[in-house]
Each structure stands twice: as C-alpha cells, then as structure tokens.
Image (cartoon, rainbow, N blue to C red):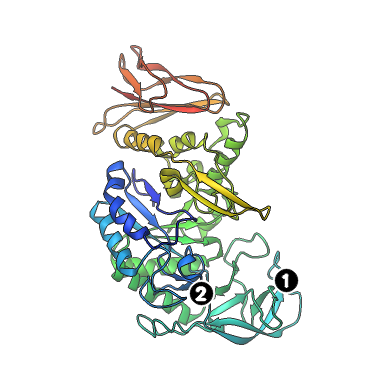
Amino acid sequence: MTELNGVMMQYFQWYLPNDGTHWQQLQVQAQDLANAGFTALWLPPAYKGHGGIDDVGYSPYDLFDLGEFEQKGTVRTKYGTRAEYLGAIQAVQAAGMQVYADVVFSHKTGGDRDEQLEAIPVERDDRNQAIGPMQKIQARTTFTFPGRNGKYSNLTWTGQHFDTVHQNTLPPGDARIYRTKPKTFATEVHHHYGTDDFQLACAIDTDHPAVQDDLKLWGEWINDTTGVDGFCFEGAAYLRPTFLNEWLVHVRRYSRRKLFAVGDYWAEDVESLHHFISTTGGQLAMLDVPLHYNFHRASRAGGRFDLRRILFGTLMREQPTLAVTFVENHNSQPLRALESVVEPWFKPLAYAMILLRREGYPCVFYGDYYGGHYVDIGRDRQPHEIWLNSHRFLIDKFLYARKHYAHGPQYDYFEHPDCLGWTRLGTPDFPKAMAVVLSDAAGGAQWMEVGKPNTIFRDVTEHIPGLVQTNEAGWGDFRCLGGSVSVWVEV
C-alpha cells in the first residue's frame, strides 16, 4: 500500500494564515519540493467549512464547494479559490509529485436551517447508554447549500441523513449528544468510549442510501475535477469501515487508477490500528500514531528512554507496508487538543528514523520543514506565542541520503539504550552504502558492517568533521554527538 521509496509532505499546519495565498504559494514551491526529494503532497481540506476563511477544513459544510461559491461569508476558503487549488495540483503533478486530498466523511457542521427531530440523549463516555427518554429537539441539520444552488449535486441534507447530533437549541445551551430516532450507532468501529461512531456536529449516517450515493458522486466529481492521486481520511476512527471499503472500490474503479489512501486514526495503542486495518481488509494505510507517541516520550525523557524500544508497539515494526510514519502533524503540534509535541532537539533523530530506514512511508510535517509562528489559547486558558523550528537543513540532507544511499539490505544495531544505529548496504542500481548512528544522551559510536572493505565515509549532516575508513572486512566505527544523529555515506 505504501509508495516504494516515496516521501510525502503534509503541506499544511493548523495555524496557517487565513489570507488565501496557500495554493498560490504551493504553485511557486512545487518544483523545489520535488527537487528536494518529495514524491507526494498531502494537502489540507480544500472545501468550504463552517468557519469560512478561518476554517482549517475540519468543520466541513459543503464538499462540492472548493472556493467557488459565496457561502459562509466567502467565496474562497482559507487557502484560496477553486481555480488556485486546481492550478496548485497541476503544478505539483507537473513537477512529478502526487497529490493527496484531505477528506472528512464523518460529519457536517454549519447547517442552513433548524429542524425538529425526535432523539434520545446519551452518555458521552458510553454513547450506547441513554440518559433520558426520547424527546423532541431542535438542531441545525438542514443543509441546502444556497450559494451552490444544486450545482454538482442536488441533495439537500436533513436530519434523516445524520444519526447523531450534539446540539439542541430547545433550550439554548444544551450541548448533550443525541441519537436521532430511529438511528443506532455503527457497530463496526472500534470501541473506546462505548463507541467511536460520533465525533462532533452532525454525524453522517453512511447507512443511508442517499448519503452513500452522494458521497460516491463526490468521489467521481473530485476525481474528474481535480485528478488527485489519493486521499487522507481524517477521523478514520469515526468512519464505518464497510462503507469506506465500498467507497474506495467504487472510486478506484471509476477512476481506473490505484489511488493511494491513508486513514488518520488517532489512537496511541497499535491494536486499534490493527483492528481498523483488519476491518478494512488492508485497503488503506494508516498514520503510525503509536510511533509518534514513542518519539514524544523519548524527546521528553532527558536521555532516560530506552532507544532499543523506540519501534516497539508501532505499525512501522508490526505492519510496515501499511504504515505512514510521521514525527509531528496538525493534531500534535503545540496548543492543539491532541498536543503531544516531539521536542525540537529530538526531531532530527526521529526524522532520520522515518526517512532513512526501509519500513514505512514517511511523511514530513510542513511546520518542521518551513517553521512557523502563531498565537493561541492553551489549556491554561492563557494566550501562548509559539515558534516552530525549521529543520529543513537536516531534512534535506536526509532526503538526499535516502535517494542516493538508503537502498538494499538493512542491518540493525539496537544494542545500547542510549545509542543505536543501522546500515544500508546498497543494490546493484544504488551500490553505495550508508551508516546511521544516533544518541539521545552522550555522544556515542557503533561498530557496524557496511559491506565495503577499506572504504571512506563522510557525515552528510556535517555534525562530525573528518572521515571514517572501514577495515578489510567492511566494518567501521561510526560516531555521533550527544543528542544528535550522523549519517555516514560512502565517498
């Protein structure tokens, strides 16, 4: 499922400016990203969100509005217009890279009219447990999309198309979760709190035939309109796997293309990801969230994390062909609800692990490549100013090493809790070898085999000057600085 030797970038972070220039910026940067070694870009949600120009895209209102219609107080989205989006995709593909579209199928928000429904209030932590009788509520569940006026799709969404809501305007301020009559929660999703079927807003009922037809129509339309090469399904934990499989089969058959797919299922335990992979029959890869949490914990441990266990409990180790590996993303970055930051000093070590090993399909975070600056309210309800460090210099070095040296057999040297390494021995097409060594404590070294007798190696990171020469058996003593990584490549 992963793209052989490919590298994607998540080409956004949560706090991008809402000036509508993102798609224009991408057109300018596309060729440089391809030259650096990226093969695919995961773009932010391109459709109209409830929050208009301020909406990151995860409060979806109209999937068919890519910045074309006057809706939610704007024509463009946070990132630009439909024409600019299509121009950006063309620029990316002309540069030889693929484009993955971010998709939210779990919910809609920002309806156009209130509607009276019969519904049952349920527990937040066990959503199959009713906490009151069936009652009449009023919720904003009617979506007429007046700006689009039936173009591309003529479906008006109403309460029958949702199985759960978290709003009742009778009385005002009621934010309980309600299951609408006669709906039930999906039973195919993995249970954490009674059920994962409901995320927020108006939860889409993918059992409804009209919903299925409209989402499949959107899949055909987005293929014809944009020519994207794949999809990232946000909030995969809240999606019914059977429908997701059905949708992927339908759109792949319609497009007559492979179409890459990855699910963003935010679970720290790898068993939840295994369960989703099993229920979807391996039709899509998964973000390796457990690996991210290992990086997070290691970066906070002050050198007391056992690096020999860094890959334990991860998809990278247990299902590498379906693992999309990442260090940071829009969910984990500072001030987000799922904040689980990988500290800046550790990020080069983590990126070396995902970019220079053979397992997984690595994804580089926009904020780690370009840096960033923003202000938001933290969990303490106080404003915080955040600066994201750019690691572009080293990431570019790793991408260069990945392209030219990260090939062939991989030998691991995970023998010390504070210092580990691995080598790549090359192939007939890429014959030069590479050795990677990193430490989360004091500087260290690894005695490792690279299969190249009496050969000179240099550190492409430029952390350690000088050279290393292997012995007559093809072994060498490869070093790194404390809290650092060195990548030794054959001269």
Dot 2: what SS? loop
Instruction: Tell whether 130 sits left or right of 5.
Output: right
- Could you tell which of marks 1 and 2 lies nearer the N-terminus? 1
Instruction: Tell me residue 181's x, y (percent).
Output: 64, 83
Q: Relative to residue 394, is residue 39 depicted above or below?
A: below
Work out how far the residue at label 1 is from the one at label 2, CA to CA, in angstroms.
Answer: 21 Å
Residue position for label 1? 129
> Which residue does the image show at 64% across and 73% down from the upper left?
166
Going by the numbered disc 1, the residue's amino acid type is Gln
Instruction: Tell me residue 143's x, y (percent).
Output: 50, 82
Q: Relative to residue 425, is residue 211 depicted above or below?
A: below
Which residue lies most toward the right here?
132
**For the residue carrying disc 2, how many other residues have a C-alpha within 10 Å: few (<14), some (14-19), or many (20+)?**
many
Residue position for label 2? 206
- Give residue 470's quadrant in the image: top left
Q: Relative to residue 88, is residue 360 depicted above or below?
A: above
Pick the front one: 413 or 120 = 120
- Give residue 415's quadrant in the image: top right
Q: Relative to residue 68, is residue 325 depicted above or below?
A: above
Going by the numbered disc 2, the residue's amino acid type is Thr
The quadrant of the picture occupied by the C terminus is top left
